[in-house]
Amino acid sequence: MKIKGFQGTSLLDFPGRIASLIFFGGCNLTCPFCHNPTLVLDPDQYPDYPLPSILQELEQRRTFIDGVVISGGEPTLDPECINLIRAIKAMGLLVKLDTNGLRPDRIERMLTEGLIDYLAFDLKTAPARYGELHTAPVDLNALQRSITLVMGSSIDYEFRSTCVPGLVEPADIDAMGEAISGAKRWALQQFVPGHALDDTLREHPPHDASILQDYASSARRYAGEVILRGV
Ligand code: SF4
């Protein structure tokens, strides 16, 4: 299991909850705006957290956390991720999964077993532009299958898009909106250039706040609730 990071307590990452955060190394994308580039490009520079020590730390926090955020990297790539989540659920804690949605088989299994309480699904740009997020082809059927699975499930969820200039422009908002039309919630996030994987983006100014407001207006045509973050 490639658990590469653990944060004891966060108020920000699980809506309305106090949570611990677990970070898996590795990813099946290399998004130019990724803010965890070392976790994606060189996860082996970090030691692995052994499962027993993670569970022990969670047990010590059991009385003051509500749940655990499983993040990365892309956590669903690790076949052991589901065992970790089963163990966390057995402790009576809630689980939020952060995912890019490209492993629908694993997401389906987690949903079928009732292991996920909240899912944050990163929708990066228009599906037709996903080739710009990686050096290898991206399986758009997998992306669409995960969208259908999550929207058809009974869990609480959000789609989440970081509005990177050049990658998220007005036409992309519409294309993403059409892909998730009828979604419960869509969070549009401001781009923070500082730690971007592609260093040419690090000096790139984010969209003006007024542009994100316009995006939110457009997004409301497709999702029941639209949240703006970071503006
Ligand atoms: S932003 Fe998410 S999906 Fe993209 S490379 Fe980073 S961890 Fe992977």
Image: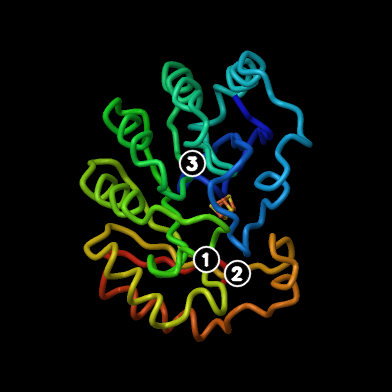
Q: Is mark 3 in CB contact (under 8 Å) with mark 2?
A: no
Q: Position of residue 153 (x, y in %)?
A: 23, 42
Which residue in the protein does label 1 denote? 162
> Which label's residue is closer to the chain start, 3 or 2?
3
**Amino acid identity at mark 1:** Thr
Q: Nearer the viewer, residue 121 or 212?
A: 121
Which residue is situated farthest in the right direction here?
Answer: 45
* Residue 17: numbered disc: 3
Q: Is the residue indicated by label 3 positioned so its CB lies within 8 Å of ligand 1?
A: no
Tell me which residue sits at (27%, 70%) in the image: 178
Horizontal relation, residue 39 to residue 134: left or right: right
Quarter of the image containing the N terminus?
A: top right
SS label for mark 2: loop
Q: Is mark 1 in CB contact (under 8 Å) with mark 2?
A: yes
Tell me where residue 181 sits by quadrant: bottom left
Q: Is the residue indicated by label 1 positioned so its CB lies within 8 Å of ligand 1?
A: yes
Q: Position of residue 90 (x, y in %)?
A: 42, 16
Horizontal relation, residue 25 to residue 200: left or right: left
Tell me which residue sits at (50%, 36%) in the image: 77
SS label for mark 1: strand
